Amino acid sequence: MGGSKNKSPAQKEKSQDSKKSDSKKSKKGDKSEGGSVKAEIRVTLTEQQAAKALKSSKVITVQELARQTGVKISAANAFLIEAAKKGTVKKVGGYSGHHIYQPVSA
């Protein structure tokens, strides 16, 4: 039902000028700010990192362990599965891959 309205030559110039000034501002901003800061995500999880996260909580999920230790969810999941096999944590709930684990007290 109708297309976009054709802009007048003055409107076209204004939109081109604003695009040019925006691109100039963004280039200057990138240099002065030093770029965006991204979180560094690790792929490995050590026993000490996991023990610290497990000790501070009553129950833990894969997503929570990954967030606290700064590793990928797949690495946290693999660690929790291995820990469950070893007996350091036990599965207390959850379903369909979203399991809840609890540290086993000695």
Image (spheres, helix red, strand yellow):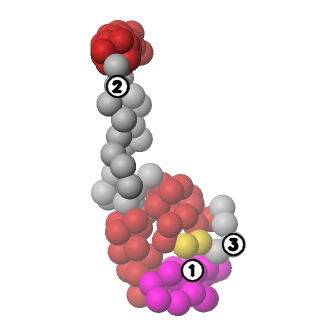
**Amino acid type, residue under disc 3 in the picture:** Lys
Image coords of residue 79 (percent x, y): 39, 72
Residue 75: percent from left, percent from top: 35, 66
Q: Residue at x 38, y 17 (%)?
A: 11
Asked which secondary structure carries label 2, the reply is loop
Which residue does the image show at 66% across and 61% down from the upper left? 56
Residues packed near mark 2 inside 10 Å, few (<14), some (14 to 19) or many (20 plus): few
Badge 3, how many Cα within 10 Å: few under 14, some, many 20+? Answer: few
Name the secondary structure under disc 1: strand
Q: Which residues are magenta?
A: 86-106
Q: Quadrant of the N terminus?
A: bottom left
Q: First in sequence: mark 1 or mark 2?
A: 2
Q: Which residue is depicted at the point 55% across and 73% down?
A: 61
Label 3 sits on residue: 58
**In the displayed structure image, the side of residue 65 where residue 2 appears, left or right:** left
The quadrant of the image that shows the C terminus is bottom right
C-beta proximity under 8 Å, tags 2 and 3: no
At 41% from the left edge and 31% from the top edge, which residue is drawn? 37
| Closer to the eye: label 2 or 3 | 2
